[in-house]
Amino acid sequence: MPPRIAAIIPTYNEVELLTACVESLEAQGYPNLEIVIANAGDALPAELAHRVTELDVPENFFWTACIDAGVQAVKGKCDFYLFTNADTTFVEGAVNRLLLAVESGEKTIACSPAYIQLGDQPVSLLYSDQSDLGPLLYGKLVRRWTSPGDAPMDPFPIDLTGGQGVLIPSALFESASMDVSRFPHYASDHDLWLQARRLGYRLLLVPQAGIVNKRDFNETKRKNLGPLFKALKKRMTSVYTPESWPIMWRLRRKHQGPILGFFTTFVSFGLRWTIGLPKILRRT
């Protein structure tokens, strides 16, 4: 019997996006795949609900808590977890390619490159993987090619990735866990990969797999400086934004200790809010 895979998808029940994600998983043709929806929104429509396992979670559950709910619901019932988001779809053959990679060696996590497609635009690479930048634990987006046709054939090891299109041995969660209290939304995937690396796991990028994001990173245009400054202040301080001091500090404090963690947070926060400021402004 093929290994059992549980695909876990957090959602606020945006039906059109979620349906596209589910259909892309069904189209993989993998015979032992369970689709688990951690739903913090309205109940799924009947035509979708009968095709998946729906978990009704509180509306204040963000990404980390939804993923954790999915993990706990099927713990002991699957061999691998497949994490993704409701606004993504899987390229053809992705699941089988990820499975081949994860079975190529012990303690391997197989990762998909992330593409983006908005409307009728062609699919283009959003990022292939992410870089630590040494001890900074920065998570810098890396783009090693531009379109699916340019992707290399063979898998290779990487530092980091996002939380989408990642196939994880269920055995990892015997020693690691989603840290909901520290990282309610952002950085919990980064934290999980650091936990995994400490336990001897490697992250293997599978270029011929892939997930396609169906919307951008909430880019907006603001004309008034008052609301902009208020929004920027929130991004600096909120535990629900990736570039805030609390989240960046919590990650480094947990994995590097208070002394090294303070210095790497200070440098990383400075880089994020200087070199990375144009990107933050586009998303604010």
Image: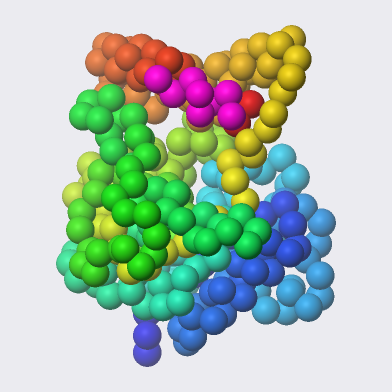
Q: In the picture shown, does residue 254 fall above or below 111?
A: above
Q: Main secondary structure of the magenta part?
A: helix
Asked whether residue 116 appears in the rendered view, the answer is: yes
First to last magenta residue range: 275-282
Q: Position of residue 202 (x, y in %)?
A: 22, 53
In the image, what residue occupies the spot 40% across and 20% down?
Answer: 275
> Can residue 240 be seen at all in this image of the molecule?
no
For image coordinates 46% across by 39% down, the residue present is 188
> Where residue 103 sits: x, y (%)?
24, 72
Residue 56 location, x and y as percent? 72, 58
Question: Height in image: 197 above or below 212?
Answer: above
Residue at 69 percent across and 16 percent down: it is 228
Q: Which x, y percent locates residue 39? A: 70, 57
Identify the coloring: rainbow
Residue 189 is a magenta residue: no
Q: Is residue 90 above or below residue 282?
A: below
In-front residue for pair 87/76: 87
Instruction: Tell whether 27 sits left or right of 259.
Output: right
Outermost residue, bottom direction? Answer: 1
> Which corner quadrant of the image does residue 274 belong to?
top left
* Quadrant the C terminus occupies: top right
Q: Is residue 278 magenta?
A: yes
Looking at the image, which residue is at 28% across and 58% down?
205
Quarter holding the N terminus is bottom left
| Residue 251 versus residue 26 in the image, above or below | above
Identify which residue, 207 or 65, lies in the foreground. 207
Figure disc tally: 0
Judging depth in this view, the residue of 104 and 131 nearest the camera is 131
Classify residue 132 by image quadrant.
Answer: top left
